[in-house]
Image: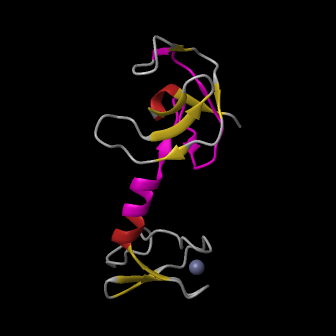
Amino acid sequence: MTSASTADTLPACPECREEYTYEQGALLVCPMCGHEWTAGEADDAAASAQVTDAVGNVLADGDTVTIVKSLKVKGSGSGTLKIGTKVRGIRLTGDAGDGHDIDATVPGFGRMKLKSSIVKKVL
Ligand SMILES: [Zn+2]
């Protein structure tokens, strides 16, 4: 193995999942479907798109989740959001710096922000 080939480490095509990716300058190219992208782009997308719940399921906009950790809700009286509460149609907002990365309308509480670490996706 004296070759400096990087074929083994190039990512599969994000479009068609074929693994014949080759490098063309700064671009990664898929000969199967013709898709061109940059490694940096793919990394950024993966890093910002992957929001996981308490057990590692990847969450997406519109998912239904249940609360796995009861928590006191500030600003709407003195309610406690109970374990098992079902929340439909979550929206991923990205972590604003305080760990809250989900925007959702919670039954009985209205619209609020949640942490992905205290929800579990309903599969
Ligand atoms: Zn492809």
Corner quadrant of residue 64: top right
Pick the residue in front: 90 or 13.
90
Q: Name the residue at 46% across, 68% down.
A: 11
* 20 up-or-down from 71: above or below: below
Quarter in which the N terminus is drawn: bottom left
Q: Name the residue at 39% across, 35% down.
A: 100
Q: Would residue 33 appear left or right of 51 to someone viewing this image?
A: right
* 72 up-or-down from 59: above or below: above
Q: Name the residue at 60% across, 74% down.
A: 18
Pick the residue in front: 11 or 79.
79
Q: Is residue 58 magenta-colored?
A: yes
Pick the residue in front: 89 or 24.
89
Q: Position of residue 86 (x, y in %)?
A: 66, 27
Q: Position of residue 102 (x, y in %)?
A: 48, 40
Corner quadrant of residue 5: bottom left
Q: Is residue 49 magenta-colored?
A: yes
Model colouring? secondary structure
Q: Which residues are magenta?
A: 44-72
